[in-house]
Amino acid sequence: MEKRDAKGLTEEEFLRQYNPDKYPKPSLTADILVFRKKPDSDEPDILLIRRKGHPFIDHWALPGGFAERGETIGATAARELEEETGVSGIAMELVGLYSRPGRDPRGWTVSAAYMAVVREDQVKPVAGDDAGEVCWAKVSAEHGSVQIRIGDDCINQNLAFDHYEIISDAIKKYYENRRL
């Protein structure tokens, strides 16, 4: 006997009349943090891209982008990392979800942030897709605050979206795990 809900509907009947537009939906994105461990330093570098387009044109950002229909968010992370930096085949782990209203000026966007740690010689990133440039920035945790530097310039305030917050969360995880 088929189970019926309080309205007397079977699951098949319920799904036929269900309106998926009843609830607003956010866009889903992935942001990827690739930390490069150097043998002579406890402080890692992080892979950043310079955005070629709006929003945040010319700002430094984490590689990442929108999920495609039918794609897992892990597959989105791998695809976007390869499209923007040429880096592929590295193990990634989830750092967290980021959903603060207003984090993306294009609208309601939820991002799954993934992190990977690579050896200094393991990857050779190149700019592609939405990336005008790629670079390894120095990351340090000083007095409870994360500093991200390209050369002598601190770029904390010049990162796109909420990427400073994501990097800060991931660097804590990096130091807790002390991998590679």
Image: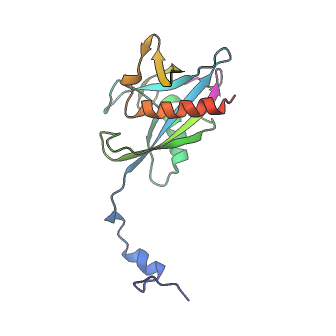
Q: Is residue 3 magenta?
A: no
Q: Which of the two residues, 15 or 159, is positioned nearer the viewer here? A: 159
Quadrant of the drawing holding the N terminus: bottom right
Q: Residue furthest front?
A: 143
- Residue 87 appears in view: no
Please give the name of the residue rendered at 44% of the width and 53% of the height, measured from the top-left corner: 69
Quadrant of res 61:
top left
Count of numbered labels shown in the rendering: 0
Residue at the spot 30% in from the left edge and 39% down from the top edge? 105
* Between 176 and 162, the one nearer to me in the picture: 176
Q: Residue furthest top?
A: 152
Is 126 part of what is drawn in magenta?
Answer: yes
User: At which x and y percent is residue 85?
Assistant: 51, 29
Question: Which of the 4 quarters of the picture holds residue 17?
Answer: bottom left
Residue depicted at x 45% and y 82%: 5
- Left or right of 82: which side holds 50? left
Give above or below for 13 relative to 138: below
Is residue 52 something that shows in the picture?
yes
Question: Is residue 71 positioned above or below 51 on the image?
Answer: below
Tell me where residue 30 appears, x and y as whole percent: 47, 41
Q: Which residues are magenta?
A: 118-127
The residue that appears at 38% across and 72% down in the rendered structure is 18
**The C terminus sits in image quarter:** top right
Principal SS element in the magenta part?
loop
Q: Quadrant of the rendered structure where residue 120 is?
A: top right
Q: Residue furthest bottom?
A: 1
Where in the figure is residue 27, as x and y percent of width and height? 38, 49
